[in-house]
Amino acid sequence: MSSSNKIKIVALFGKSAAGKDTVQKELLKQGDFHKIVSCTTRFPREGEVDGIDYHFLTHKGFTEDLFENKFIEALEFNGWFYGTKIEDLNKEKINIGIFTPEGILCLIDSEYSCNLSILPIYIECPDKIRLMRALDREEDPNIGEICRRYEADEKDFNIIDYYFRSVRNDNEPTALKDSVQKILDYTKAFFVQDK
């Protein structure tokens, strides 16, 4: 497959409460992007909709799809399985999804990688702001779960050995707008260069 025919992926990643979902939503308003809807075996959280937030699969269904090579990346996290199916990618647009550092490594190392053009972008945010966002997300936040996520982030983000770009998404008035513009610039330069 020639590089101009590769499936384009912007892989957003960042620590808990860094604002990945917010950045993704803003980018999707630009029209050139296609949202990657990942699969999971975990149960839907309050307000989540099947096919919009995730494709919620049974453990058996996920395993069958895994053995049939339908995933470009799949991993286990906290007892649940997560993954991205090749059929959920759009060949005409730039696909944008949220991944873990390990998920991006799976994309890079997958058997489909020669058909993919992957731009990892790290969403940076100071720990204090992330903690305040996590506390403000829910009316009665689970402090133990917030602490568990922070400890897991320290481990998961300790060593990232692949190329990535980064943007800062703190609480400055123009931070979100600036982050989105930077990602648009990175995307334009990367995918033109990658042809």
Image: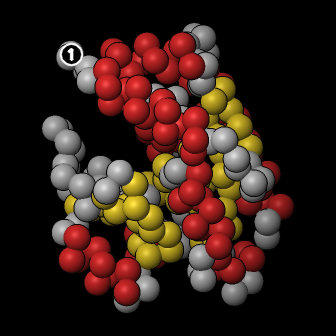
Comparing 75 with 104, the one in front is 75
The answer to which image quadrant residue 63 occupies is bottom left
Residue 28 image offset from top left, x and y in percent: 47, 45
Q: For residue 51, say whether it is visible.
A: no
Residue 144 image offset from top left, x and y in percent: 32, 25
Color theme of the render: secondary structure
Q: Is residue 169 above or below residue 106?
A: above
Q: For residue 18, say whether it is visible.
A: yes
Q: On the rendered structure, is 177 left or right of 145?
A: right
The C terminus - image quarter: bottom right
The answer to which image quadrant residue 65 occupies is bottom left
At 61% from the left and 19% from the top, the residue drawn is 126
The N terminus - image quarter: bottom right
Type of the residue with mark 1: Glu
Q: Is residue 48 above or below residue 178?
A: below
Q: On the rendered structure, is 185 left or right of 78?
A: right
The answer to which image quadrant residue 35 occupies is bottom left
Q: Residue furthest right?
A: 193
At 57% from the left and 45% from the top, the residue drawn is 156
At 63% from the left and 30% from the top, the residue drawn is 124
Residue 90 image offset from top left, x and y in percent: 48, 69
Q: Is residue 125 above or below residue 158?
A: above
Label 1 belongs to which residue?
A: 139
Residue 47 image offset from top left, x and y in percent: 17, 38
Q: SS of the residue at dot 1?
A: loop
Q: Residues within 10 Å of mark 1 (few under 14, many from 20)?
A: few
At 31% from the left and 58% from the top, the residue drawn is 80
| Number of numbered discs overlaid on the protein picture | 1
